[in-house]
């Protein structure tokens, strides 16, 4: 294994966070699970420690227990703005930057600002606050994540219009999952602790059905787990920690000129779907790959395109040394737990000289991984051709037998003089 060193990209990412505020997101599956309540509890603990805390914007939605937690916290007056013959109120970003607290509470990260504000979205306001060196606590529902927008629409039948780029969640320093059992959330809804009374029946029938909430809870848990896993991998890269750590399963499929490349991709997709984990398809370019035939190159390109269509991550590696070492190094950097390889096509012994059997090398050196070698299910082994020598039809059989006996005799004579062989008949039997 090559010497582990901190990766420059990981160190650069850490350096870029120097001087910025820290972002903590309270993530929930749906309204009413208690994200704002948990945010205010955390803020009160920080204030009790002597931290300067300002509530820039906190939406209590009339909940008495939530409003009670605001008592004693410094509230930032909102900015009034005239829009469509109405006076609306938004967070006063300039006043917050001028006040410059140590910690700011900015609720509902996915909120859209009034047209004419400095930023269209509240998450953009948060980015400016963080750049000023102010820590931020905020809240977010999982259905507002951009990449989950379509999935939430299929689950609930409701298209969420306010979205937040997934990169915002990825850059968060801490993500805390606020979870509530489905039945308890529905009871809170019926008790009027989430929506006003005239909206309860419609909410329970549509968005807040038991099936919808169960699916949203799973999405929220996976989003939080993915963020924690990303933090773990970043820590491992920045501190030159060799993997894999058995935290979350991840599948890597190594594509070579094996005839089962497309089968490998489909197998990896099925395994990833069953385990509901990430998977990545990699191919390695080396001096040997430059000698690939055109059909082999086309097969590799088709396998990579198939991996992209099936939703896998695709990566191309460059290896100056053995291909197996590059695959294993990449797997450790990505904290991969399982590696899929294709069984190489049979070759004559003289064509195998000087060529590395990647599947065998990865299996022998990758003892930290679960390695699966996949064969082509459509390929049936061809039985070796049996040639029957007939004396009547082929007189060369006599010559072959005679030469075999002469060769065995010479070998037996040499062995008898050099080695203490007890039974020279084995040489003749072999012949």
Image (cartoon, helix red, strand yellow):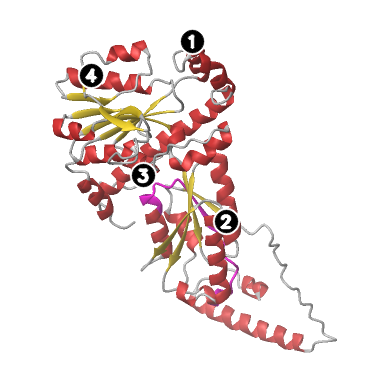
Mark closest to the chain's N terminus, 3 or 1: 3
Task: Report the Cα–Cα distance between label 4 and label 3.
Answer: 28 Å
Q: Relative to residue 99, is residue 346 depicted above or below?
A: below
Residue 191's label in the rendered image is: 1
Segment colored magenta: 331-350
Residue 355 image offset from top left, x and y in percent = 47, 71
Q: Relative to residue 357, is residue 46 depicted above or below?
A: above
Residue 167's label in the rendered image is: 3
Task: Report the Cα–Cα distance between label 2 and label 3.
Answer: 31 Å
Seen at 38% across and 14% down, the residue is 63
Quarter that holds the N terminus: bottom left
Front position in the image: 35 or 242: 35
Name the quadrant containing residue 379: bottom right
Task: Report the Cα–Cα distance between label 3 and label 1.
Answer: 36 Å
Pointer 3 local density, CA inside 10 Å: few below 14, some 14–19, many at least 20 = few
Residue 221 image offset from top left, x and y in percent = 45, 31
Query: Which residue does the numbered mark 2 point to in the structure image?
Result: 264
Task: Report the Cα–Cα distance between label 4 and label 2.
Answer: 52 Å
């Amino acid at each position: 294994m090559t010497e582990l060193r901190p990766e420059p990209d990981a160190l650069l990412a850490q350096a870029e966070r120097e001087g910025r505020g820290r972002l903590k997101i309270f993530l929930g599956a749906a309204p009413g699970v208690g994200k704002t309540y948990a945010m205010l509890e955390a803020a009160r603990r920080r204030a009790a420690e002597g931290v300067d805390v300002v509530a820039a914007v906190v939406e209590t939605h009339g909940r008495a227990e939530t409003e009670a937690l605001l008592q004693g916290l410094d509230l930032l007056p909102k900015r009034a703005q005239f829009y469509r013959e109405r006076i609306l109120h938004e967070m006063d970003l300039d006043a917050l930057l001028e006040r410059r607290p140590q910690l700011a509470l900015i609720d509902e990260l996915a909120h859209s600002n009034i047209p004419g504000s400095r930023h269209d979205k509240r998450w953009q306001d948060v980015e400016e606050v963080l750049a000023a060196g102010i820590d931020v606590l905020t809240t977010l529902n999982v259905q507002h994540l951009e990449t989950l927008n379509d999935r939430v629409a299929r689950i609930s039948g409701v298209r969420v219009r306010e979205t937040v780029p997934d990169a915002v969640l990825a850059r968060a320093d801490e993500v805390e999952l606020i979870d509530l059992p489905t039945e308890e959330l529905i009871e809170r809804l019926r008790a009027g602790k989430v929506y006003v009374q005239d909206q309860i029946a419609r909410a329970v029938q549509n968005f807040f059905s038991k099936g919808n909430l169960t699916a949203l809870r799973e999405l929220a848990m996976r989003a939080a787990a993915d963020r924690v896993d990303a933090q773990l991998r970043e820590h491992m890269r920045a501190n030159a920690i060799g993997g894999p750590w058995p935290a979350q399963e991840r599948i890597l499929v190594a594509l070579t000129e094996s005839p089962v490349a497309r089968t490998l991709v489909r197998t990896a997709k099925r395994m990833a779907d069953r385990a509901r984990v990430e998977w990545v398809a990699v191919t390695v370019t080396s001096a040997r790959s430059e000698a690939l035939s055109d059909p082999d190159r086309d097969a590799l390109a088709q396998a990579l395109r198939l991996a992209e269509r099936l939703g896998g991550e695709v990566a191309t590696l460059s290896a100056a040394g053995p291909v197996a070492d590059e695959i294993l190094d990449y797997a450790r950097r990505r904290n991969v737990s399982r590696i899929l390889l294709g069984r190489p096509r049979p070759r004559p012994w003289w064509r195998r000289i000087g060529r590395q059997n990647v599947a065998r090398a990865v299996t022998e050196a990758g003892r930290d991984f679960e390695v699966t070698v996949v064969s082509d299910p459509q390929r049936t082994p061809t039985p070796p051709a049996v040639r029957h020598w007939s004396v009547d039809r082929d007189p060369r059989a006599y010559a072959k037998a005679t030469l075999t006996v002469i060769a065995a005799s010479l070998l037996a004579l040499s062995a008898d003089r050099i080695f203490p062989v007890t039974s020279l008949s084995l040489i003749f039997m072999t012949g």
